Image (cartoon, rainbow, N blue to C red):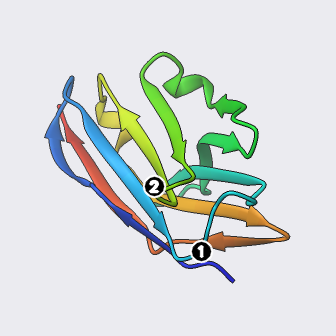
Amino acid sequence: QVQLVESGGGLVQAGESLRLSCAASESIFSIDVMGWYRQVPGKQRELVASIAAGGRTKYAEFVKGRFTISRDNAKNTVDLQMNSLKSEDTGVYYCNALWGLSYWGQGTQVTVSS
């Protein structure tokens, strides 16, 4: 079982940047896929970006060119660099680890004011 703790959320203006970090309680070296999801009230949780153990990344269309996901196996962290933020990026961002089972962090709030 792996525990995930997100950090780095906050309130920013449109056009600014934030960097989210997810710290895992176990080594992420063997974890198949690490990802970031977001959820807004009234909508389902949706994938923002993911990174596989081999380094392959996947991004939602609405963040391509603005967000970058990275994985540090030595530090057991997965970061999400978010640039050119828009008001529609507002939501709770969750870290996910797919390792046989799906594990979730508690989420971190990102609010982008226009």
Residue furthest front in the image: 74
Q: Secondary structure at mark 1?
A: loop
Where is residue 66? Give x, y as percent: 42, 21
| Identity, as a three-letter code, of the amino acid under mark 2 | Val
Report the residue at 37% width, 35% height from top. Answer: 81
Q: Nearer the viewer, residue 9 or 28?
A: 28
Residue for badge 2? 40
Image point (63%, 78%), residue name: 2
Look at the picture and state if 47 lies above or below 57.
below
Q: Position of residue 78 (x, y in %)?
A: 50, 51
Within 10 Å of the Cα at label 1, are there few (<14), some (14-19), or many (20+) other Cα atoms?
A: some
User: In percent of the image, x 31 and y 26: which residue is there?
Assistant: 83
Query: How many numbered markers are drawn?
Result: 2
Q: Position of residue 73 (x, y in %)?
A: 57, 52
The label nearer to you, 1 versus 2, is 1
Q: Quadrant of residue 50?
A: top right
Q: Is residue 4 left or right of residue 45?
A: left
Q: Earlier in the sequence, mark 1 or mark 2?
A: 1
- The foreground one among 6 and 29 is 29
For the C terminus, the quadrant is top left
Q: Residue at x 66, y 41 (%)?
A: 51
Q: Left of 42 or right of it: where is 21? A: left
In the rendered view, tell whether residue 67 sits above or below residue 97: above
Q: CA distance from mark 1 to mark 2?
A: 29 Å
- Asked if the residue under mark 2 is in contact with the one under mark 1, i.e. CB atoms within 8 Å, the reply is no
Judge left or right: residue 99 versus residue 51. Answer: right
Label number found at residue 26: 1
Q: Amino acid at mark 1?
A: Glu
User: Judging from the image, what secondary structure is the residue with disc 2 in?
Assistant: loop
